[in-house]
Image (tube, coloured by chain):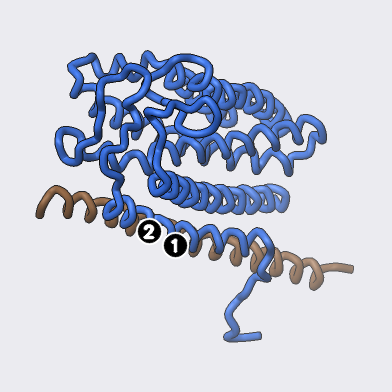
Amino acid sequence: MAGQAWRRPVTPAAALRRASLWATLLLFPALILLAWFRVPEGVPLLGGLGAPDWSYQPDVAAPLTRKLLFFHPATAWTSFAAYLIVFAFGTAYLNERDLRYDRPAQAAAEVGFAMNTAALLTGTFWGVQEWSRSGQAALATVYSEPKVLVVVVLWLTFAAYLLLRRLADGPERRARLAAAFGILGFVAVPTSFLTSRLLATSLHPDIAGPGSNPDAAIDGSVGALLLLSFLAFLALGLHLFLQRLRLLDAEARLGGAA
Amino acid sequence: LSDEASFLLAFLGLWGILAAYLLRLERVARRLERRIEEAGGAEAGKGKEGGP
């Protein structure tokens, strides 16, 4: 009807997209304000396992590191969740050979790569700030840690994955190669998880679960803030994933129509 | 401004940029979908007119 606004029917994907958008917009200010006004005092997160005594005194030498606690792990966990989606849809594609499974894998890989980059940047910033206080070669200390190296390998693998998607000819060949690459790349995610549990490491102490380091344990309020930060980044990652998927679906519709 | 206040403002500024980006992304995607739908509808109409 003339003059009536065009309205698309609300699909489950659209509802989820809208929910993740509002969750992102509400959770981030809550996180920022809580992290600011409710910042834990003296959390010895890096104090265990023989590292120097990092008591996290506020605004002494590394004021930003206290806040990075709510950004660095959350971006890393969100990237791992995105890579899990790449793994799942890559496996589904190789089983079914249906290109509909390739698009979610691509969208998730792009979001995962962005989050992985954010995790590496915040981690580098955090590590360099902290370790330069100890008189150690800060960058070398951070990048010689096994877990960091595994995550760097993960980042390089998915950088190659995205490059491969641009270079490979033909949608089927591209999807097949990308699925295989995504599945192989995902191996680094459980490896990274196990690295901090099986190898002695002072940069990423095991802070929860059986066998965790009591010196690096976090109290309830910090744990709640960490959970909030994870939910905020998960909502952002989910929203970006759904938007990217929407665009890829639109491209596929246009490609099919051409 | 103290360090604390500038730090808080920087984070809130980043959130503002993020919010503006996400809302713009939503608007652009919606417009794109509407155009695709309209182009599809026009194609279908043309097919009907010129059809047997």
For residue A227, the mark is none
Nearest the eye: A150 or A98: A150
Nearest the eye: A55 or A117: A55
Q: Amino acid at mark 1?
A: Leu
- What colour do you see for chain A? blue
Task: Return the chain for callout 2.
Answer: A
Residue A240 in picture, x, y percent from top left: 52, 50
Residue B3 in picture, x, y percent from top left: 14, 48
Determine if marks 1 and 2 fall on one subunit: no
Please identify the residue farthest to the right as the structure is shown.
B52
Q: Which residue is mark 1?
A: B23
Label 1 vs label 2, nearer the camera: 2
Residue B29 found in image quarter: bottom right
On screen, residue A36 above or below A87? below
Residue B26 in picture, x, y percent from top left: 50, 61
Residue A112 in picture, x, y percent from top left: 52, 37
Q: Which residue is mark 2?
A: A30
Q: Residue at x 39, y 49 (%)?
A: A221
Please identify the residue farthest to the front as the structure is shown.
A214
Q: Residue at x 49, y 63 (%)?
A: A22
Crowding at mark 1 (Cα within 10 Å: few <14, some 14-19, many 20+) = few
Regarding residue A160, the answer to whether it shows in the image is no
Task: Return the chain for callout 1.
Answer: B
